[in-house]
Image (cartoon, rainbow, N blue to C red):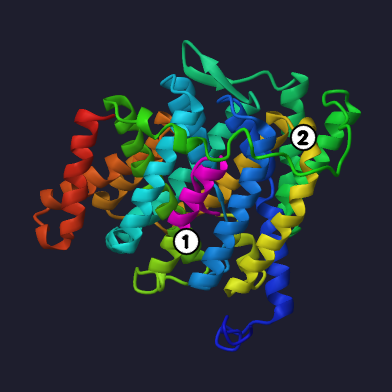
């Protein structure tokens, strides 16, 4: 085991990797609570989504740990589950089984692109500054979702958005939870996000805002409501509207997961010379979990940015991922807590995870206008349009434009020219 995971070469040990795995799990365990709530708003059965989320995390995390030897967790993406529910199911009025089939088809295309190493080539050719912009932009988007879920930010017909009533009990609970979680994190308490959710829930119960759970430990919820539904709806996707949804899932997931992997690889110092070693196997694990997740009954998974917590305490190999997967296996038996978790309780986690991802903004070269404009547009348009894909597309269009204006044609990789052209077509015919 030590030899397979290269403990000696990466200067690590079982104790160090185990601690890192537990830390990462505690930091990302909130996805078991948040994902069923978000997908539940699309009409999916929360218990089944809970089980699908855990199993997808277990399988995906084992794949990336064993195949790529990365100390990373994989779980359903916060950005993509929101896109699934609010943009596709609610916004476009598409039934969740059909939308999930779109996720399944996009996942298969993901696997093909990964096997052909197309994803790897594209990721490695994205300019470094745009990689930082993507990572931080996703952070702003996720934080904005948390602020909206807590009603800290509300709609306003005059100013589009404004601050909500912070004295409303449920909003006040979210604010209290945010302060508690921040205090734990800045004191270096690993798993502070998870502990923050637990403490906020207890406070909500004491305040009479949250009902007591009927039990804590229970049977694993059945997958029957969601398992395999994608196979019976493949024939429903061959319409212009659904094909555009599949393309959008592929487009959004492609660059959403790429952005997160870039952010994690940079923090773990895995990236060298603007390239991620062994990225092909990591991307294959990621894309395979997309297919598996859709079959089980959850939206697209991705490499988890919370893996940075485990990396910070010494996670260096895929053995960390094995520990993460083991923790998710144990968590399967705690589904009854779903009944007491509300969006106000989980909102602080979204706000803080967004803050952690936004830290990458400091690495952008803000002294060059040709970098500043594409990077800023990439970042700001993600929360303003509620779309990761839109922000990336606009940034990728503007980047070649700014360099072309300076007659720096040779500095632009041909793939960037192609992506810029495809994104223009995306806005004209799809978006």
Check the picture and name the quadrant holding the N terminus: bottom right
In the picture as drawn, the residue positioned furthest to the front comes out as 232
Q: Residues within 10 Å of mark 1 (few under 14, many from 20)?
A: many
Q: Secondary structure at mark 2?
A: helix
Label 1: which secondary element: helix
Towards the viewer: 406 or 247: 247
Residue 246 left/right relative to 350: left
Please tell me which residue is depicted at 47% across the width and 49% down the height of the picture. 290
Would residue 381 appear left or right of 311 to someone viewing this image? left
- State the residue at coordinates (62%, 38%): 35
Note whether 371 is above or below 230 in the view shown: below
Q: Is residue 53 magenta?
A: no
Task: Give the x, y percent position of residue 51.
Answer: 67, 44
For label 1, the residue is 285
Residue that mark 2 sits on:
176
Q: Is residue 136 left or right of residue 196?
A: left
Residue 180: % across, % down: 77, 43
Q: Is residue 303 magenta?
A: yes
Residue 366: in sight, yes or no? Answer: no
- Which residue is depicted at the point 69% across and 66% down? 323
Quadrant, the C terminus? top left
Residue at image point 43% right, 31% down = 233
Compared with 417, 231 (above or below) is: above
**Residue 128, placed above or below residue 95:** below
Spatial CA distance of label 2 from label 1 is 38 Å
Numbered range of the magenta stretch: 286-304
Q: Earlier in the sequence, mark 2 or mark 1?
A: 2
Residue 127 place in picture, x, y as percent: 29, 59
Q: Is residue 351 left or right of residue 219?
A: left
> For the residues carrying marks 2 and 1, which lies nearer the camera in this image?
1
């Amino acid at each position: 085991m030590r030899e397979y995971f290269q403990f000696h070469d990466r200067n690590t040990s079982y104790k160090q990797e185990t601690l890192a795995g537990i830390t990462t799990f505690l930091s990302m365990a909130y996805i078991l609570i948040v994902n069923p709530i978000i997908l539940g708003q699309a009409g999916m059965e929360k218990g089944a989504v809970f089980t699908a989320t855990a199993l997808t995390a277990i399988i995906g995390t084992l794949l990336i740990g064993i195949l790529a030897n990365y100390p990373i967790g994989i779980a359903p993406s916060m950005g993509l589950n929101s896109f699934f529910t609010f943009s596709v199911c609610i916004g476009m009025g598409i039934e969740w089984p059909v939308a999930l089939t779109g996720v399944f088809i996009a996942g298969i295309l993901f696997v093909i692109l990964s096997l052909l190493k197309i994803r790897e080539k594209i990721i490695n050719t994205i300019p470094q500054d745009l990689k930082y912009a993507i990572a931080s932009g996703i952070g702003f988007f996720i934080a904005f979702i948390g602020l909206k879920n807590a009603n800290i930010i509300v709609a306003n017909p005059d100013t589009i958005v404004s601050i909500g009533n912070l004295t409303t009990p449920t909003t006040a609970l979210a604010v209290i939870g945010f302060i508690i979680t921040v205090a734990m994190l800045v004191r270096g308490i690993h798993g502070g996000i998870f502990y923050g959710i637990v403490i906020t829930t207890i406070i909500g119960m004491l305040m009479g805002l949250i009902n007591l759970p009927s039990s804590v430990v229970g049977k694993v919820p059945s997958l029957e409501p969601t398992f395999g539904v994608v196979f019976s709806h493949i024939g429903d996707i061959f319409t212009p509207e659904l094909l555009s949804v599949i393309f959008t899932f592929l487009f959004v997931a492609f660059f959403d997961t790429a952005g997160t992997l870039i952010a994690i690889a940079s923090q773990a110092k895995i990236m060298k010379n603007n390239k991620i070693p062994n990225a092909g196997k990591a991307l294959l694990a990621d894309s395979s979990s997309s297919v598996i997740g859709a079959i089980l009954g959850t939206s697209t998974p991705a490499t988890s940015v919370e893996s940075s917590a485990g990396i910070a305490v010494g996670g260096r190999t895929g053995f960390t991922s094995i520990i993460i997967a083991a923790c998710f296996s144990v968590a399967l038996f705690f589904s009854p807590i779903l009944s007491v978790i509300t969006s106000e309780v989980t909102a602080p986690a979204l706000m803080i995870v967004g803050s952690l991802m936004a830290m990458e903004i400091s690495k952008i070269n803000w002294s060059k206008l040709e970098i500043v404009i594409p990077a800023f547009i990439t970042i700001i348009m993600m929360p303003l349009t509620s779309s990761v894909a839109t922000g990336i597309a606009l940034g990728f269009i503007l980047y070649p434009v700014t360099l072309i204006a300076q007659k720096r044609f040779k500095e632009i990789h041909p793939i960037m020219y192609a992506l810029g052209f495809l994104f223009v077509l995306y806005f004209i015919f799809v978006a």
